[in-house]
Image (cartoon, rainbow, N blue to C red):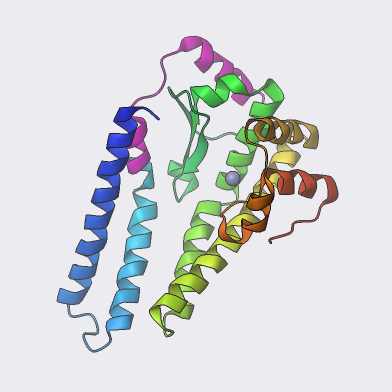
């Protein structure tokens, strides 16, 4: 990761900590249920999550800064996007690390960010597979569903003790996120074919092979391992743990 991105990431972390503090303060001084500290904390957590998801495109824009001007790579990306029957906004940014992710609560302003490192690394089919996976997240509103899940979990577990609440909510949220990853793979396979998506997953696996420890600690991860995703595609089974 280059120094500018590290510096901007640090600034973002500090800004989010300040935002969390400010939201909590506003909830308290606005007199929201002053007798019930747990309820006002819950309300502050909900507000923070909603704001966090809403401004995610701005935060990512701050990190990425400007789209790549490498015309050859932009043309390659556009060629692949043209071959997809359903598309969404994709921004290519200069970075040697291999990244692809999507932000935006609503389809209208959602955007997929792809690093030049990832674009150069993956084959044609590999790129189709990962792009179709991200497009399915957008098409099926997975980011909005993640936020709703997080809010429901916080509301349901809020009467319990804070540590229990955070831990339980965290693990339930992660399990739903893993389910959405499988859903995105199913959508991707429908859009570009199972073989293209399998190719993406094998290419990503070659980059970062799944190790045994990773498989054991998958319950604490927001994503199934790549080997779990490959097996899910081959067998149709979607194990969450
Ligand atoms: Zn995904």
Direction bottom: furthest residue: 35
Residue in the image at 33% along x and 41% along y? 58
In the image, residue 240 above or below residue 188:
below
Q: Is residue 74 magenta?
A: yes
Residue 42, position in %: x, y?
Answer: 35, 75
Quadrant where ligand 1 appears: top right
The residue that appears at 28% across and 45% down in the rendered structure is 12
Quadrant assignment, res 76: top right
Residue extending farthest to the top is 72
Q: Position of residue 84 (x, y in %)?
A: 66, 29
80 lies above or below 231: above
The magenta stretch is 59-86
Residue at point 35%, 54% (across, down): 52
Reply yes or no: does residue 68 show up in magenta. Answer: yes
Look at the magenta stretch and give its main secondary structure: helix
Looking at the image, residue 11 sits to the left or right of residue 116; the answer is left
């Amino acid at each position: 990761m280059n120094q500018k991105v590290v510096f901007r990431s640090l600034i973002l972390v500090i800004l989010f900590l300040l935002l969390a503090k400010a939201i909590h303060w506003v909830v308290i001084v606005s007199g929201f249920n002053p007798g019930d500290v747990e309820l006002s904390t819950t309300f502050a957590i909900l507000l923070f999550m909603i704001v966090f998801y809403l401004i995610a495109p701005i935060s990512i824009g701050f990190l990425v800064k400007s789209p790549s001007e490498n015309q050859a790579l932009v043309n390659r990306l556009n060629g692949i996007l043209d071959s997809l029957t359903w598309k969404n906004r994709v921004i290519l940014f200069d970075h040697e690390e291999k990244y692809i992710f999507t932000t935006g609560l609503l389809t209208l302003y959602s955007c997929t960010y792809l690093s030049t490192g990832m674009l150069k690394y993956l084959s044609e089919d590999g790129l189709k597979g990962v792009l179709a996976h991200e497009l399915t997240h957008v098409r099926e509103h997975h980011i909005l569903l993640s936020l709703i899940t997080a809010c429901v979990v916080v509301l349901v577990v809020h009467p319990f003790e804070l540590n229990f609440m955070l831990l339980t909510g965290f693990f339930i949220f992660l399990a739903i996120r893993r389910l959405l990853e499988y859903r995105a793979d199913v959508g991707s396979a429908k859009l570009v074919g199972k073989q293209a998506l399998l190719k993406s997953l094998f290419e990503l696996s070659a980059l970062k092979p799944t190790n045994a420890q990773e498989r054991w600690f998958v319950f604490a991860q927001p994503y199934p391992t790549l080997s779990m995703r490959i097996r899910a595609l081959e067998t149709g089974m979607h194990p969450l743990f």
